[in-house]
Image (spheres, helix red, strand yellow):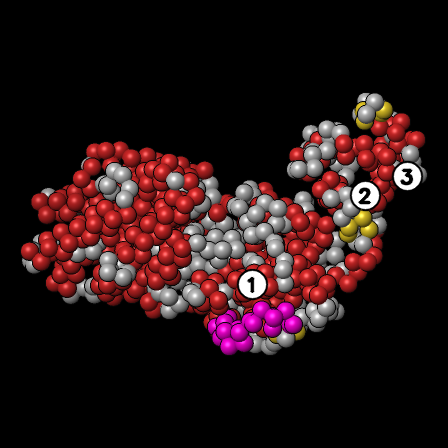
Amino acid sequence: MKPLHHYAQNLLSTRLGTKDLCVLDQWAQDILIENDPRTEDIPLDSVWTADVDVDFGTPGDRLAVLRALAPAELLSLAWLSRITQPKTGHFASNLKLAKIYDLEIMAEPEASNPRERFRSLLIQEGLSLPEAKDPGFFNGHSSDDARLTHALLHLYLAHRAQRLFPELIGYTIAHFGRINSAWDEAMQRSERSRSKSHLICVEAAKTHLQEHDHSWRIHRGWKLYQMSYRLQFAHLNDQANAIPHRVLMSRLIQTKWPEAKGYHHKVMLQGDSLDSLIATHQEDLTPVLNRLRQSHFVDAACPVKSQLIQATHFGGPMFGVFQTKEQALMEAWISDPNGSTLDDPCSSALTSTAPSFPETSTESKRTPYRSYTYRSLYLNALSTESPLEASPEQKSLCLKILNQAKWWNRLRPFAALPKSYDAHVLTLWIEHRHHQSVEKAEASKTTPPIDKSFCRWLILQCAPAILTDGAWLSGIQTLEERIDTPTLKLWRTYLDELGDGHTEWNHPNVYRRLLDSQRIPMAAFDQPAFIEDPRLIDSAFRLPAYLMSVALFSRDFLPEILGLNLAIETSGLGHHYLSAIRALKAHDIDPSIIELHLSIDNLSSGHSRWALEAIIHYLNELDQRGGYALITNSWSRIRQGYASLSTAALPMATHSIAYYALSQHLPWLCTSPNTVIES
Ligand SMILES: [Fe+2]
Ligand SMILES: [Fe+2]
């Protein structure tokens, strides 16, 4: 395993691959095993004190404490950032935790945000640390890697929000149950807000426990938080005993040399071979280390790229010679020879102190499907827990539909967003289209000529999409320290789609009630029986498979998602929704799901307006960073995303029209929708 700071930094930028995630799974499993509390019974709502032996009173110690806390505090609650996914966003306990994330991290004003409060405390104490996403942020902690366990768990758990859900509840309860730390008081952590979030979290635990026997796993998460929190302070009082990297590096070479001598006569340092240099300076390797630092084997600007480090990787001449901790020391020596650490890899007393835990559940493992159809992509996207595990097939579906959208814009320029970007023109264009649609609805108040059986058939075919309503925004939450305005706008919309913390307001749940009221039985949407349902047409899965897939690549497709979001939120307003409501009412079918969207998506101050504002904010920020060229490129991608709703939904729309025409004029060619639905 590589050093923890490597994983932390790369999880922040979503640059890790599936293999790295597997390594982290094993790391987390080991920690969980050591924190398994099967025999203990801890009251869920109990509070605890950090109880660590550090003095926050003196300026020097205060700075050491703040530095130690910074990685985790600046990423506070990051573990909740993916707590609601298309597969889990309709469950009460997930919604409660999402509400906590909203209240603490996404709510305005920023003063209530714990990350902002910690940043203010750092500034107040004169500590200037880079933002967490800065490539150097975690590297600065490489010499005391185990202390990063807490921050790395924050980030890792966000990628395991399904399989480690009970642990994640316990982890959150422990976070809000922590009291009486001097630094919490200095941060002016509001007792009232802490207690409120604590209560919501305990409620989430109780709700979860009504259906699952996971009490011990919740407690395990609780212990995991406490252990990793305390680990941040390891050795904090022992700085005086710290050993400089150059001394540790000398020890390391001396330890390895007996088996290595004779192999380095071709490694030349300023005219002498490494073999001869070490033989000459065996007692004090300082001259050898100085020459090594000045050679081309060392790149102080980027330690990991140094030939010395590369030689220890797979395929290099020293692969397998050095352990992870030893490699970390070499990197630390390259970046700062006079820096210090207590962690001497040559000492057996300092083997890993990170504790561990039990096997992870396999309940959310992806369903293997060999041939990729829209149906299988739907099920696989639902089961994809982390964007790091998104498949090439999911990405190629996105690219295929977006490519079609490019052509769609050329074929139907009148329906495409304006060719060049201007915030005022865009706003007028959207408002004009909305007014046209409302006028059309007012001009034609007749009930659409569709019969009840066709309505019921359509309700069935829309199920795959509406049971995952909001999916296109399920990946916009970032692990980064600061959340930008466009992300906040998209998050607010996403939270509304999920019911803003209430299961009964959750759009997929509203649709479930409609299916029940129409006596249209369906298998659970995350089960193979759902996608194998013969009543459903293939194209019913195309749009939702695309929406879930594109969300898994939110960092890659952000402009496209902004355009897609605008299309989705504005598409039904006016004529379409009003006609559909009339049709449903005429057949005595509950129109709540459409009425709900008609109001919540409104262009005045609802989702459509936020979608517009998110695009304008996004492009304004780009303008400040890079100017016109960046805007032009992003605008064309936003236009493509906008059109992609049509290209993704087109096959189902075409199929529905054909089905309706056939059922009206050649009914013997169609199976009766009633028969199909009620079978
Ligand atoms: Fe919705
Ligand atoms: Fe909406």
Q: Report how far apart the C-alphas of labels 1 and 3 lie in the structure.
A: 46 Å
| Upstream in sequence: badge 1 or badge 3 | 1
Q: Report how far apart the C-alphas of labels 1 and 2 lie in the structure.
A: 35 Å
Marks 3 and 1: in contact by CB < 8 Å?
Answer: no
656 or 577, which lies in front? 577
Where is mark 2, residue-wise?
246
| Upstream in sequence: badge 1 or badge 2 | 1
> Dot 1, crowdedness within 10 Å: few (<14), some or many (≥20)?
some
Q: For numbered disc 3, what is the local secondary structure?
A: loop
Kind of residue at disc 3: Asp
Which dot marks residue 284?
3
Kind of residue at disc 1: Ser
Q: For numbered disc 2, what is the local secondary structure?
A: helix
| Upstream in sequence: badge 2 or badge 3 | 2
* In the displayed structure image, the side of residue 261 where residue 632 appears, left or right: left
Q: Residue at x 21, y 33 (%)?
A: 411
Q: Is mark 2 within 8 Å of ligand 2?
A: no
Where is mark 1, residue-wise?
120
Q: For numbered disc 1, what is the local secondary structure?
A: helix
672 or 144, which lies in front? 144
Q: Is residue 577 magenta?
A: no
Residue 414: image quadrant is top left
Q: Residue at x 45, y 45 (%)?
A: 555
589 or 73, which lies in front? 73
209 or 548, which lies in front? 548
Please provide percent x and percent y for residue 225. Answer: 62, 64
For the magenta stretch, what is the residue range? 181-202
